[in-house]
Image: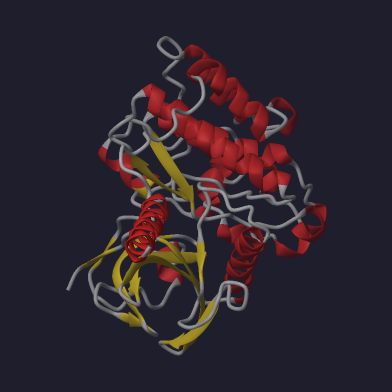
């Protein structure tokens, strides 16, 4: 039976391998679950995307639609997922949750996020680490671009403003991503108004300056989106710099403008792709005539040297806001919320009770 790799598109003649290419991150996971499979008490609806360090699934848990993120086998992948879950846990406990970040759910039934931010279970001879988060109506940006490689330029601007604001929020919390790509986020397009909404479900290395050298590992980042200063750099020589994430933002914007990855990576080995990154071998920027300023923002952000780029994700976002304005807010529903309806019903019942009581007292009198 032929088997097609969901990630790199290669076809394997037999079903013994997820992919015939050993460098493909899909091959790093020995067990990719399918619709109807069970992961403990969680039923898989479908795999959403295979990342280099984890797999994202749509699933159901206690009859509720959720997302399940499972780390690939390996200590580095496990620790990265734990850091991500614990970071989201800390935000929620401090009531600092952001709409563009996952809303963590308890890993097990009859527990809480404060107690169990992540879980672990045995599957196929591997002890796998996972966490759950609330469902988001959307799909990976990578899938969106397969159908429509060049989005409407206003959608590009608003999407990137939202992404840059989210990255800036991570920086404000003292965390670095270092692995941004179209695989990192889910996107949906609201009908009214016609605006993209994002969820950054993969937080990259998600570590702070003090622990960057021990937490960084290169394989977790797709080679085509790895900043040049991270390539062939020993962990002890890594520099925590916001401009590394600006590079990631620039590479995503570059791809949205030209309609294909800035550095071609399909059917190429990691070393070949990394060589192209360090040499600046990119698809030519062909949007100079129609969206010149936006193209210039992307080109600046993807400078090979950090000093060439915008200093922060905030500066990057502000440059785009000057062109596209703020991201339009979601349209408010004409119907009151459930909480408002509940309060109204309670008030109404109290009023009815008081009226009945008054009538009863008057009749007695």
From the viewer's perspective, tell me whether residue 159 is left or right of residue 35: right
Identify the residue at image location x=44%, y=50%. Answer: 183
Tell me the colour scheme of the image. secondary structure
Identify the residue at image location x=32%, y=30%. Answer: 194
- Measuring from the top left, give residue 149's x and y in whole percent: 32, 34
Image quadrant holding the C terminus, namely: bottom left
Q: Is residue 257 visible?
A: yes
Q: Quadrant of residue 287?
A: top left
Q: Nearer the viewer, residue 202 or 60?
A: 60
Q: Specify the farthest residue to the front.
A: 365
- Count of all numbered marks drawn on residues in the image: 0
Q: Is residue 282 visible?
A: no
Vertically, is 345 above or below 20? above
Image quadrant holding the N terminus, namely: bottom left
From the viewer's perspective, tell me whether residue 233 is left or right of residue 88: right
- Measuring from the top left, give residue 201's x and y in whole percent: 49, 55
- Measuring from the top left, give residue 49's x and y in whole percent: 38, 59
Q: Specify the farthest residue to the top.
A: 289
From the viewer's perspective, tell me whether residue 178 is left or right of residue 59: right
Identify the residue at image location x=59%, y=53%. Answer: 97
Identify the residue at image location x=55%, y=52%. Answer: 271
- Measuring from the top left, give residue 292's x and y in whole percent: 49, 12
Q: Nearer the viewer, residue 214 or 42?
A: 42
Q: Nearer the viewer, residue 202 or 288?
A: 202
């Amino acid at each position: 039976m032929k088997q097609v790799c969901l990630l790199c598109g290669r076809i394997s003649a037999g079903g013994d391998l997820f992919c015939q290419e050993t460098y493909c991150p899909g091959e790093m996971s020995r067990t990719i679950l399918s619709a109807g499979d069970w992961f403990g008490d969680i039923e898989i609806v479908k795999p959403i995307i295979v990342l280099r360090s984890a797999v994202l699934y749509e699933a159901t848990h206690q009859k509720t639609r959720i997302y399940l993120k499972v780390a690939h086998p390996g200590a580095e992948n496990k620790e990265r997922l734990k850091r991500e879950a614990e970071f989201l846990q800390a935000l929620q406990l401090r009531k600092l949750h952001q709409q563009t970040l996952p809303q963590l759910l308890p890993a097990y039934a009859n527990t809480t996020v404060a107690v169990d931010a992540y879980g672990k279970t045995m599957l196929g001879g591997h002890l796998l680490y996972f966490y759950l988060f609330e469902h988001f109506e959307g799909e990976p940006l990578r899938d969106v671009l397969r159908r429509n490689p060049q989005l409407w330029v206003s959608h590009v601007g608003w999407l990137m403003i939202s992404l840059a604001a989210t990255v800036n929020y991570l920086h404000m919390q003292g965390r670095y991503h270092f692995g941004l790509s179209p695989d990192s986020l889910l996107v949906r397009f609201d009908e009214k108004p016609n605006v993209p909404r994002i969820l950054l479900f993969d937080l990259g290395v998600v570590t702070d300056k003090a622990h960057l050298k021990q937490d960084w590992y290169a394989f977790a980042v797709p080679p085509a989106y790895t900043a040049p200063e991270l390539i062939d750099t020993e962990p002890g020589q890594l520099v925590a710099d916001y401009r590394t994430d600006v590079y990631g933002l620039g590479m995503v914007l570059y791809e949205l403008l030209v309609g294909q990855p800035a550095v071609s990576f399909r059917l190429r080995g990691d070393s070949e792709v990394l060589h192209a990154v360090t040499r600046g071998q990119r698809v030519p920027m062909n949007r100079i005539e129609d969206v010149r300023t936006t193209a210039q923002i992307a080109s600046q952000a993807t400078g090979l040297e950090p000093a060439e780029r915008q200093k922060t994700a905030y500066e990057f976002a502000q440059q785009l806001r000057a062109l596209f304005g703020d991201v339009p807010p979601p349209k408010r529903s004409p119907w009151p919320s459930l909480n408002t309806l509940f309060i109204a019903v309670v008030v109404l019942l109290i009023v009815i009770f008081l009226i009945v009581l008054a009538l009863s007292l008057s009749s007695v009198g």
